[in-house]
Image: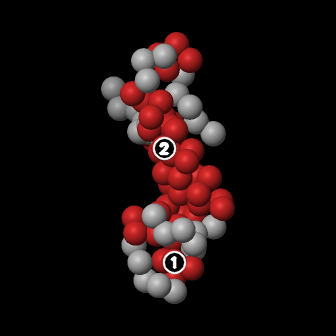
Amino acid sequence: MPKYYEDIEEINAKKGYACEHIKDDLLECLLKSDCCKKDKKTPRQCMLDPSIQDDCVRLRVAFFECKRSLLDMRTRFRGRKDY
């Protein structure tokens, strides 16, 4: 039996990969930074640049913590770290 369009949107909204929200926010922050705009660098190159904003640095650390929590066996009980 086919599902309604609204039901499909709800199902697709729940199908996110791990740390998806932090990664999207980090990418958006890096793309708005002067490193990407003025210097024309890629977001990957700007992640290692020491002149990026503090917000981007915090998001980078949060993304690292989220990815590291995927490998930690204790997260089965505690759940993934997400902000």
Vertical order, 27 against 74 (above or below): below
Local SS, label 1? helix
Furthest residue toward right: 54
User: Residue shown at 58%/52% (left/top)?
Assistant: 59
- State the image coordinates of residue 76 (x, y, percent, origin top left): 47, 16
Residue extending farthest bottom = 38
Q: Which circle marks residue 49 in the picture?
A: none
**Which residue is under mark 1?**
35
Q: Residues within 10 Å of mark 2 (few under 14, many from 20)?
A: some
Residue furthest to the front in view is: 50
Residue 11 visible in the displayed image: no
Q: Which mark is residue 64?
A: 2
Give the CA separation, mark 1 to mark 2. Answer: 21 Å
Q: Residue at x 56, y 17 (%)?
A: 78
Residue appearing at x 48%, y 44% in the figure: 64
Left or right of 69? Residue 59 is right
Q: Quadrant of the C terminus?
A: top right
The reply to whether residue 17 is in sight is yes
Q: Residue at x 57, y 64 (%)?
A: 29
